[in-house]
Image (cartoon, rainbow, N blue to C red):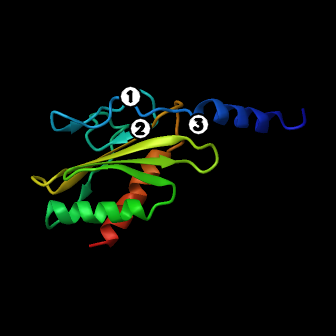
Amino acid sequence: MRYPFLCCLVLIAAMGGCSSHRPHVLGVDNGSLSDCPDSPNCVSSQSPTPDHFISPLRYTGTADDARRRLLSVLRGMKRTRITVAESRYVHAECTSFLFRFVDDVEFLIDDGVKAVHVRSASRTGHSDLGVNRRRIETIRKKFNLQK
């Protein structure tokens, strides 16, 4: 075979990228988003470990306004599908372009501290090469521009 590396990537995508299922650990439990797994393919503003920690989104004004801004940002992102949009909790699925891997992105609006807690995690694999962290930073920039 002339391109064994390419064939392996296609096989990996066919086996795992398209067949991932929504994890059962999503949502809010006792006022918090789920913890990140030990693997480096997750970031969370509620994580106690520095490798997984990322700052929450900050806002002024009302929680409803923060939710509206957040939903606007998510609707403007390619390959992103909002699956839950409750008053204080939002879940979206982000699908990668090439291999169709799905990442779960969650948001918990905490009006008491004017923060939107975030969690972004890959459904499959071990490393995400920083994709989830970069995604949240992109969302943060767009969220802050919508003031």
Judge depth for marks 1 and 3 and give the one in front.
Answer: 3
Tag 2's secondary structure? strand
Report x, y in % for residue 60.
16, 66
Tag 3's secondary structure? helix
Mark 3: which amino acid? Gly
Real-space Cα distance between discs 2 and 3? 17 Å
Toward the right, the furthest residue is 2
Q: In this view, does 100 lie above or below 80?
A: above
* Residue at x 15% of width, y 57% of height: 114
Real-space Cα distance between discs 1 and 2? 7 Å
Proximity of marks 1 and 3: CB atoms separated by less than 8 Å: no
Q: Name the residue under label 3.
A: 17
Mark 2: which amino acid? Cys
Toward the top, the furthest residue is 38
Report x, y in % for residue 49.
31, 33
Q: Mark 1 points at which residue?
A: 37
Toward the left, the furthest residue is 112
Mark 1: which amino acid? Pro
Quarter of the C terminus within the rendering:
bottom left
Q: Quadrant of residue 13?
A: top right
* Residue at x 52% of width, y 47% of height: 95
First in sequence: mark 1 vs mark 2 = 1
Q: Residue 42 carries which label?
A: 2
Crowd rating for badge 1 (residues with CA inside 10 Å; few <14, some 14–19, many 20+): few
In screen coordinates, is 95 left or right of 76? right
Crowd rating for badge 3 (residues with CA inside 10 Å; few <14, some 14–19, many 20+): many
Q: Quadrant of residue 8?
A: top right
Q: Which mark is residue 59?
A: none
Could you say which is closer to the camera, residue 65 or residue 116?
65
